[in-house]
Image: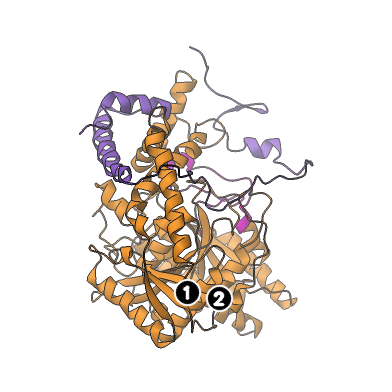
Amino acid sequence: MNLNELTIHELRDKLAAGETTALAIAEAVFRRIDAVESKIHAFISLMRESALEEAAAADRRIAAGDATDLTGIPIAVKDVLCTKGSPTTCGSRILENFVPPYDATVIAKLKAAGAVIIGKTNMDEFAMGSSTERSAFGLTRNPWDLERIPGGSSGGSAAAMAADECIAAIGTDTGGSIRQPASLCGVVGLKPTYGLVSRYGLVAFASSLDQIGPFAKDAEDCAIMLNALAGHDPKDSTSVPAEAPDYRMFPGREAKGWTVGIPKEYFVEGIDPEISAAVNGVIATLERLGVAFREVSLPRTKYCVAVYYIIAPSEASSNLARYDGVRYGFRSAGSRNLIDMFKQSRLEGFGSEVKRRIMIGTYSLSAGYYDAYYKKASQVRTLMRQDFDEAFKTCDALVTPVTPTPAFRIGEKMDDPIQMYLSDIFTLSTNLAGLPGISVPCGYTTTGLPIGVQFMARHFDEGKLLTIASALERETPFEKRRPAL
Amino acid sequence: MVKITRQEVEYVAHLARLDFTDDEKNRFTAQLNDILMYMDVLNAVDTTGVEPMTHAIARTNAFREDIVCESLETEAALANAPERQGPYFRVPKVID
C-alpha cells in the first residue's frame, strides 16, 4: 500500500518505529495529487512548499521524541478557514485575492500538533450548497463516479479523502456540510456539538449553526482529529469552557447494552430503497452486538427544512454584510459613490445562490415579516430541540440515513433551489439543536456509490458516536474501500 | 399566490446592498415566491407561548478581563485593502 492510503494511526506507528518519514508521506500525498487532481479538482489551492517545510520540521520533532498523533500527518483544510499568508477564498470571487493575516484557531492547533497542512479544499461559495457545484473556482467531482457531485458544501475535503489525496481533512457543517459529503464519498465525517470547537478564524455563514469538524478514514482517526480540534478558546465567545476528554478512549469500546432510537419520521417515503436497506443492515448488525433499538418520534422533523432555510439565510445576510469592498475582498472599479460601490462589488463578487440566500434572510428579518418568518422559525426550533430532549431521555443515540439518495448527477439540481435544499433533509436538525452527528460508511449501491449512516447523540456525547462507529467498522469495514481512479 | 412582488424584491435588494439586472429581478421574484410558499408549512405549528431559540447551547455572556491583548499591526490590517491612503482605507465619495 502507498503511504497516502494509510490512516493517521497507521502512519503514526510507522513514524514512531522509524519505518517512514513525514517527508516521504508528504511526497506520497503530493504524488497522488499530481496524478488524480486534474480529474477530481478537490483543491482550490495547494501549499506544497510550506507543507514540505512542515514535514521536514515534523521529522526533526519526531527525532527529538516530541511527536503527537498528528506530527507529520498531511491534512487538507476547507478553504473557509483562515490560513496566515495563504489565500482563503470561501469559494467566492469576492475573496479571490484575500490573504488572511492570521491563522484560525483550529489551524494553529493543527500546526502546534505538528500536522502538515497541504492545501485548501473546494467548497460551495460561503458553504452555501449541497454539491460543491457553486464554487466560483469550478466544481469538484465525486471520485466514485466522476459524473456525480461529491456532496457539499465541504465536497473538496470529502473528495480529497476518497481519492487518497490527504490523510485527514477539515470541513465545516452548518446543515450537513460535513456529514452529507462524507456519506456520498464513503468516508467518516463528524459534526461536533455546537461550542466544542473554536470558530475563531472560520469565515462565518450562520453563526448559531456553524461547526468545524473532521473527515477521517476511520473512527480512530476521527478521535485523533477531534482531540486536536476540541477545547475552549477565549477568542470564540461561543466556545464552551469545559475540558474535552481524550477521545481516543472511545473507539474500541463496546456498544452492548445501549438503546438506540430510530426516529420514525426519518424513514418515510422518498428515501432511495438501497439506502433504507443499508441502514436496516446497520440496525441488524448492531442488534447482533447487543444494541437494543426502539422507535422514537421527532414530530417536528417535517419542518426542519423550512426552519433552517429561514434561520441560516437570516444569519448569513447579517454575516455577509461585511463584504462591502472597503477593507478586504473584491471592489468593483469605477463606482460613482460609496453606496454604488457596495452594491456593484457585491453584485459582481457574489454568486447567485449567495445572493438568493441574502435576499431570503434580509426579507425574513425585515420590518413587517420578522414575526412571520424569523421569529416563527426560531420558535419551531425550540420545539425541535425539545423533541430531541424527549428522545434522548430513553436513548443513548439515534440512527438515521444521512441523505435520501446517493450522490446525484452534476447539474441535476442546479436550477431548482428547493430540490437542492431537500437533499439536506436528514442532517439539518442536528445543527438546529446543536447536537453532534457522525456519518459512517455503511454500504454501496449496486452501481457502486457509497452510502452512509448517521448517528446523533446528546450534546458533548461525541464519545458515543465514536464508539458506535468503531463497533460498526469492526463488523462491516466499508470505510476501507476506495474508488478506482 | 404572490408572496413577494418585484417591487419588494427591489426594496429588499436595496436593504441588502445588492443590485440586480431586470432578468435577475424576474428570476429572483419567482424563486423567492416558491421558497416563501414552502415556508408556509410553519403556519401549521402552534407556537403560542414558545420562546424563540437563538442559541444552540444555553450560555450566558462570555466576559473576559479588560486587559490589552495583541492585535493586528496596521500594515497587516491594511494588506488586503482594495485601496488605501496612508494608514487609512480609501473609499469613493460618500455624498454625491
Residue A52: % across, % down: 60, 65
Magenta residues, start to end: A77-106
Residue at image location 61% in from the left, 83% down from the top: A13
At label 1, the amino acid type is Lys
- Which quadrant of the figure contains the C terminus of chain A? bottom left
Q: Which of A459 and A16 is in front in this view?
A: A459
Q: Which of the 4 image quarters holds residue A130?
A: bottom left
* Rendered location of residue A474, percent (x, y): 45, 85
Q: Are marks 1 and 2 on the same chain?
A: yes
Q: Can residue A476 be seen in this view?
A: no
User: Is A233 left or right of A260, judged from the image as shown?
Assistant: right
Place of residue A119 in the rendered image (x, y in percent of width and height, measured from the top left) = 52, 59
Residue A156, magenta (yes or no): no
Residue labelled with disc 2 = A8
**Magenta region's main secondary structure?**
loop
- Residue at label 1? A217
Q: Residues within 10 Å of mark 2 (few under 14, many from 20)?
A: many
A89 part of magenta stretch: yes
Mark closer to the chain start, 1 or 2:
2
The residue furthest left is B1
Q: Mark 2 lies on which chain?
A: A
